[in-house]
Image (cartoon, rainbow, N blue to C red):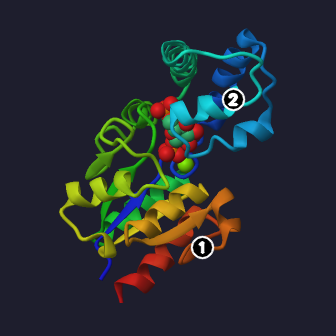
Amino acid sequence: MLKAVVFDLDGVIVHTDKYHYLGWKKLADELGIYFDETINNRLRGVSRMASLEIILERFDGKLTDEEKIAAADRKNGYYRELLKQMSPADLSPEVKETLDGLRAKGLKLAIGSSSKNAKFILERIGLGDYFDAISDGNNITHSKPDPEVFNCAAKYLGFDTKDCLVVEDAEAGIDAGIAGGFKTAAIGDAKKCGKSDFILNTFSDLLSVTDKLMK
Ligand code: B16
Ligand code: MG
């Protein structure tokens, strides 16, 4: 019986990929590394340090571990500066109405995001106090496709993973949900991986999907 929905943040609740792109692009330009939107797509759902490694594939030199941490910190500074532009207007009415509809059915709602900026982003879009639990990049040691971030969300809610639905836009996130024993629903980019239990053509499809799981 479905008791909760665990949402990935970036690409599901809100879209910050354009800011990630601009942050990484500025860093890549400074280091003289080629970077474009196609490479940026590979960073979806991937942790900050793993994203840096993907960008460094085209680097003509070598960074020490300390230099890598400094580079990732620099990008995060650029990214957080850009995030300050976000406001509740960046939360679509469809997403907010669907979340309210799910809650009205008695479901608990949680976040399971790789981002260390998840709480900051939620505050910017007016959802700072909205979710029943938040599991993010700050409480995990293993990134998606490891299920740790979703397992922690289920643990914080006090539910078994089989009673929770994971909603994801990245294949690594769907893999993480499956590995953790969750039901999974794919939206956006993750739809094409063909591994999820459900496909969401639009966010509000969650209302009918959860109806099925609650019967
Ligand atoms: P940060 P999600 C992910 O968020 C993003 O999709 C991914 O592009 C980013 O690298 C990752 O968070 C880490 O973000 O640098 O803010 O810690 O999709 O898991 O909500
Ligand atoms: Mg995502």
Residue at 18% x, 63% y is 158
Q: What is the C-alpha distance between the residues marked 1 and 2?
A: 27 Å
The x, y position of residue 40, in whole percent, is 71, 37
- Where residue 18 sits, quadrant-wise, is top right
The N terminus - image quarter: bottom left
Regarding residue 87, the answer to whether it shows in the image is no
Ligand 1 is within 8 Å of the C-beta of the residue at disc 2 = no
Q: Which residue is mark 1?
A: 195
The residue type indicated by label 1 comes to: Lys
Q: Residue at x 71, y 66 (%)?
A: 192
Q: Identify the secondary structure beneath mark 2.
A: helix
Q: Which mark is residue 8?
A: none
Q: Residue at x 63, y 40 (%)?
A: 43
Direction from residue 162 to residue 93 in the image, left or right: right
Whichever of labels 1 and 2 marks the residue nearer the N terminus, that label is 2
The reply to whether callout 1 and callout 2 are in contact (CB within 8 Å) is: no
Residue 70, image x, y percentages: 51, 13
Q: Nearer the viewer, residue 95 or 187?
A: 187
The circle drawn on residue 55 is 2
Whether residue 99 is visible, yes or no, is yes
Label 1: state its secondary structure: loop
Residue type, mark 2 in image: Ile
